[in-house]
Amino acid sequence: MDAFLVTGPSRLSGTVRAAGAKNAALPAMAAALLTDEPLVLEDAPDLADVKTMRTLLAGMGVSPRGSGATGLVLDASRVTSTEAPYDLVRTMRASILVLGPLLARFGEARVSLPGGCAIGVRPVDLHIMAMEALGARVAVEKGYIHAYVSRVGSRHGRLSGARIAFPTVTVTGTENVLLAAALAEGRTTIENAAREPEVADLARLLAAMGASVQGAGTSTITIEGIERLHGTRGVPHAILPDRIETGTYLAAGAITGGDVTVTNARPADLGSFLGALTAAGVDVSRGDGWVRAAAPEPLRATDVETAPHPGFPTDLQAQFLAMMTQARGTSRIVETIFENRFLHAGELVRLGADVRVEGRMATVHGPSRLQGAPVTASDLRASAALVLAGLAAEGPTRVRRIYHLDRGYAAMDHKLRSLGAAVERIPG
Ligand code: UD1
């Protein structure tokens, strides 16, 4: 198991390029299951989660070829299995994204229940509710979701359009419905839909495959199902840039009092995060495809509360909390999406931060003089927060279990080094 050895303090400056978004690549890859023609995806990031999705699709008979800028080609013309096994699903919850497309095209799917994860229970009841609303029969047996559409004679059945009102905003839940409804019979309306840019990116891909989708990016989405979707047909789908990776590098610059520019960025997707940076005293400038954050020292204490898009993203909460350890005053960070997403707080305290967690709120008093120490990463974004704190801390910080980081950040050690950080990947 690799670790990162971060030797601080350093002041980051320079430019990095954001990769394609993990959370847009995964549903786009699942969309390949909807058609017997090849799908070509450009800029799918080189990440453990993308590899897991490749393996999952390969197990179903899809043959993934190529990667990165030259394009990832997915051909689902010969699907031999409609099962997502436990061994893969337990490593990546987003595997649930195959449920909708498998049901829609083949009338059946067996997907392992994902189980718990460090940041909370994270049930999949809303995915199941939505597939039932579209006409699927769903049984949960022996740890698997078994869903099917009743047969019509010798043909497998087809999902039927429906009105689906989500009681909670769910990103992959909304995406699963989009994927399923694209091949369903009739119109589907999703109410209280997730407005994340990754949802709109999936709708853009489905439209390029021949689907008719209105309203993606707003809280009401309408899809008119059609019988057959086609592939990307000579116009590869470019995955949108990763806003969470972008935000993480801006926060890395800010926590070190540095000046970082991210290219291949879409600042419009990061409105509330950039607003919070500005409130913290960071000088944010932006243009077409880039965003820059130049930090003062010390930063100003700033309160944030996570919320579904366009609110402050839960996936940047840990990094912002780490930043606030270097801000003058008291910041209150409220997490409203996941019930247990402050595991990084205890580790930050080990580095010398003053953080107290009560229920859904963390209170940070700063600025603290951080000192390097061994710390253990508990989940993807918490790992990033610990690396950021290590950049600001004096002396070596060993961040263990960075396999979490590898799920969501491509070449983070290289990118941070290019900004002037001392970061090494080491065994253990
Ligand atoms: C997605 C993102 C993840 C991000 C999260 C919230 C992907 C691959 N992952 O995860 O990076 O942190 O959105 O922005 O895009 N819920 C239920 N029942 C369900 C589904 C969700 O109760 O069936 C709850 C969850 O426990 C959570 C909330 O709804 O409290 C939002 O979760 P959701 O948006 O579904 O997260 P994911 O789509 O899994």
Image (spheres, rainbow, N blue to C red):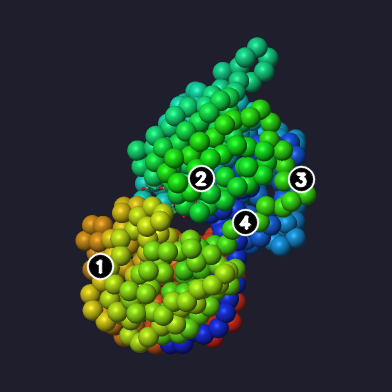
Please give the name of the residue rendered at 62% of the width and 14% of the height, measured from the top-left corner.
Answer: 152
Residue occupied by mark 1: 332
Q: Are marks 4 and 2 in contact (CB under 8 Å)?
A: no
Say what amino acid the circle numbered 1 marks. Answer: Arg
Q: Nearer the viewer, mark 3 or mark 2?
A: 2
Residue occupied by mark 2: 216
Q: Nearer the viewer, mark 4 or mark 1?
A: 4
Image quarter for residue 19?
Answer: bottom right
Please give the name of the residue rendered at 37% of the width and 74% of the height, measured from the top-left corner.
Answer: 278
Dot label at residue 233: 3
Q: Considering depth in this image, is 83 or 314 the residue closer to the camera?
A: 314
Image quarter for residue 317?
Answer: bottom left
Q: Give the CA separation, mark 4 to mark 1.
A: 34 Å
Q: Locate residue 331, reporting x and y percent.
A: 26, 71
- Dot 2 or dot 1: first in sequence order is 2
Q: Is residue 193 above or below residue 257?
A: above
Q: Give the CA separation, mark 2 to mark 1.
A: 32 Å
Residue occupied by mark 4: 239
Q: Nearer the viewer, mark 1 or mark 3?
A: 3
Q: Residues within 10 Å of mark 1 (few under 14, many from 20)?
A: many
Residue 88 visible in rendering: no
Q: Residues within 10 Å of mark 2 (few under 14, many from 20)?
A: many
- Dot 3 or dot 4: first in sequence order is 3
Q: Locate residue 364, reporting x and y percent.
A: 26, 72
Q: Locate residue 229, reporting x and y percent.
A: 68, 35
Say what amino acid the circle numbered 2 marks. Answer: Ala
Q: Are marks 3 and 4 in contact (CB under 8 Å)?
A: no
Helix, strand or loop at mark 2: loop
Say what amino acid the circle numbered 3 marks. Answer: Arg
